[in-house]
Image (cartoon, helix red, strand yellow):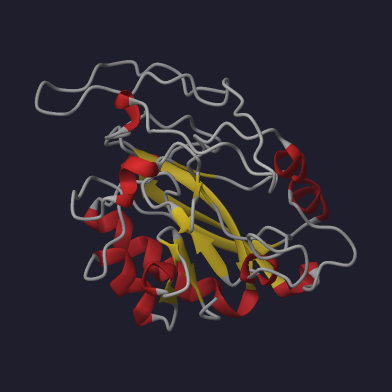
Amino acid sequence: MPPPSPTTPPSPDVPAYSTWPLGERVLPLRPDGYGEVRPTPPTLRERRYPTADVLPPPPGGRWTSSITAVTPDLAARLAWQPGCPVALSDLRYLTVAFRGFDGAAHTGELVVAASEAEDVVSVFRSLFEAGFPIEEMRLTAPSELDLPPTGDGNNTSAYVCRPTTGQTSGWSAHAYGLAIDVNPFQNPYEKDDLVLPELAGSYLDRARERPGMLQPDGLVVREFARIGWSWGGAWRTLLDYQHVSETGR
């Protein structure tokens, strides 16, 4: 669903909001099951949407965070089931304040490994204080894993019980709560002729820096390096600019 229209328009010195109808145009499938990779629509070449709040915004627009257990109700919202490689008791539910592309403070949610929870919160505090923009940050529901591809998703997320991208076996670091994808559209995955999200090819031009991108010497990569995590944008066999992980994969 597209985010709601903002109550006030952006100021004249800020780019207009993007107008692409998010999640509405299904892409034809490739033989590998991904969507057909297509040129980035002009309105998404400097993507900017107001954030649709899933949780109440932080009081007074100030930094807030929490770390709690993953309850049965939360587990029902997660892409978790018996047989996933990590027990729910070894995961933690985080809420963190983040700054949207609309300039406002919002509350995001993530599930990560219990051992990494405090460090991850410290990273997002630094990003919030620096004003690094994030479009949305919410849990990935099981139903989303089977949706037809539209190539325009941009959810910053952590825990998902799934195999490594491009493989049918072997768990992703996300399935252990040890990886986070940050602004996937601004930071796409690229391997051979595959780009994910499929409409995000404009952002493969990393020299053209735009808000929300991760860069080798940028704040996001530095902050995750501080807690011992590494960045997929530095890999050699493929490039995963959105991906940061504790495992290095």
Residue lying furthest right: 82
> Which residue occupies 42% across, 74% down?
235
Assign the N terminus to one quadrant of the image.
top right
Q: Give the number of callouts.
A: 0
Image spot of residue 69 (x, y percent):
70, 64
Image spot of residue 118 (x, y percent):
50, 74
When the figure is inspected, residue 175 is found, relative to residue 188, above or below; the finding is below
Whether residue 58 is visible, yes or no, is no
> Which residue occupies 33% across, 51% down?
204
Assign the C terminus to one quadrant of the image.
bottom right
Image spot of residue 147 (x, y percent):
71, 35
Q: Nearer the viewer, residue 213 or 26?
A: 26
Q: Is residue 77 left or right of residue 93?
A: right
Image spot of residue 32 (x, y percent):
68, 48
When the figure is inspected, residue 116 is found, relative to residue 244, above or below; the finding is below
> Which residue occupies 50% across, 22% down?
2
> Which residue occupies 52% across, 62% down?
180
Q: Is residue 178 left or right of residue 241?
A: right
Residue 172: name its quadrant.
bottom right
Q: Is residue 218 left or right of residue 119?
A: left
Residue 72: name its quadrant.
bottom right
